[in-house]
Amino acid sequence: MIFALEGKVVSKSPTEVVIDVGGVSYLVYIPVTVYDKIGDVGSNVKLYTYLIVKDEEMFLYGFSSVEEREFFKLLISVSGIGPKMAQAIMSGMSVEELKNSIVQGDVSTLVSIPGVGKKTAERVIVELRDKIAKIEFAGKPLEFISSDQVEVRNEALLALISLGFTRQVAEKAIRLAIKENEKKEFTVEELVKLALRHVTSR
């Protein structure tokens, strides 16, 4: 298995990059979130890779950290999700946001990713929620969120949207409110009030 590649960027696009390693050029498929971290053509880059062999063809997928690669491996372990779909999911938002959405059972956030339908989002949550809640990423164990609190967060989101805020603004405000308060359980009213402190635009 190729653990990582380090070399010069020959060419790049939002979904793939060609890396020259000692005179050998490798085509590596990447999520859009990784593309943003890669320098210009001619610069050095290091990607942590995962090799997929399908129909006697080999496909390399690259990530900017070991944590991202391990998350990719979790995604492709879900029934019905192949490497291309996993790449698309990881292109939609950061690994941290994806982990939190899965652990919290947040279907609405996952289906906001292009190409991810409700059934796919639900399957990802069902198959990965417990696994992710027990795994440490970047040295921080994820907290398991009760189904009651998932409902509270969804109702708070709807309340903010009904007040005229966009879904993106409302979701960000709720995340910040939860992050900055040590309390693990909220009522809908409490969470809405806390989130409103972080809302800056409609």
Image (spheres, grey):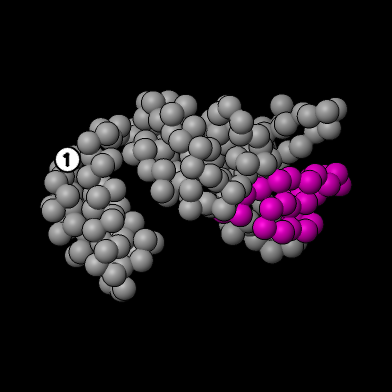
7 vs 85, nearest the viewer: 85
Q: Is residue 95 above or below residue 140?
A: below
Q: Amino acid at mark 1?
A: Glu
**What residue is shown with label 1?**
185
Viewer-closest of 122 and 97:
122
Residue 7 in the magenta stretch? The answer is yes
Residue 56, image x, y percentages:
85, 27
Which image quadrant: the N terminus? top right
* Coordinates of residue 99 in the picture (x, y in percent): 42, 40
Q: Position of residue 141 (x, y in %)?
A: 34, 32
Residue 100 appearing in the image? no
Residue at x-position 14% and y-position 46%: 187
In the image, is 89 to the left or to the right of 61?
A: left
Task: Give the residue drawn at x 67%, y 41%.
Answer: 84
Tell me which segment is drawn in magenta. 6-34
The picture quadrant where one finds residue 78 is top right
191 left or right of 18 in image? left
